[in-house]
Amino acid sequence: MPRIENEPKLDFKDVLLRPKRSTLRSRADVDLVREYIFRNSKKSYSGVPVIASNMDTVGTFEMAHALLAHKLFTAIHKHYTVEQWKEFHSQFRETPMFNNIAVSSGISDRDLDKELSKRTTFIRVTQQTNDMYVPYEV
């Protein structure tokens, strides 16, 4: 039997953010970086938990580069070619860039084939350059 809830529900207009006492003298003193330890892998991520969307005009290599300075995360859109990924990797392999990006793919068989092609090529490029970064397992 469905349960009917009669209590009032809150919306964004009902939220009041109240400042908390702080010893900070300026907003510049605020540190948004957080460290997360993942339960199953025990690996950790340190950064600001904000992700730029994987939309065509937002999740770009340029956006990832700009947001890296602030330790923000970028979901890269799926429309980059293997050649563009190779160039991106060679340009940023000495930086922590690859700790702050996620790769997007579609759901069709064609999208999956394209993604596997990128991953296989990316693994080869990583192995040839002897990077410490461990890419995806295929």
Image (cartoon, helix red, strand yellow):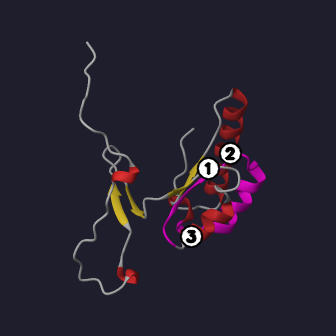
Q: At 34% from the left edge and 52% from the top edge, which residue is drawn?
A: 14
How many other residues sit within 10 Å of disc 1, few (<14), some (14-19) or many (≥20)? Answer: some
| Mark-to-mark CA distance, 2 and 3 | 22 Å
Tell me which amino acid carries mark 3.
Answer: Thr
How many other residues sit within 10 Å of disc 3, few (<14), some (14-19) or many (≥20)? Answer: few
Q: Position of residue 13 (x, y in %)?
A: 39, 53
Q: Quadrant of residue 125?
A: bottom right
Q: How many labels does the image show?
A: 3
How many other residues sit within 10 Å of disc 2, few (<14), some (14-19) or many (≥20)? Answer: some
Q: Which of marks 1 and 2 is in front?
A: 1
Contact check, label 2 and label 3, Cβ < 8 Å: no
Q: Nearer the viewer, residue 130 or 19?
A: 19
| Mark-to-mark CA distance, 1 and 2 | 8 Å
Q: Which residue is the site of mark 2?
A: 78
Q: What element carries label 2?
A: loop
Q: Give the range drawn in magenta.
A: 70-96
Q: Which residue is the site of mark 1?
A: 54
Q: Which residue lies furthest to the bottom in this view?
A: 25
Up-down relation of residue 6 to residue 58 (above or below): above
Q: Which of marks 2 and 3 is nearer the N terminus?
A: 2
Q: Which of marks 1 and 3 is nearer the N terminus?
A: 1
Q: Which residue is the site of mark 3?
A: 95
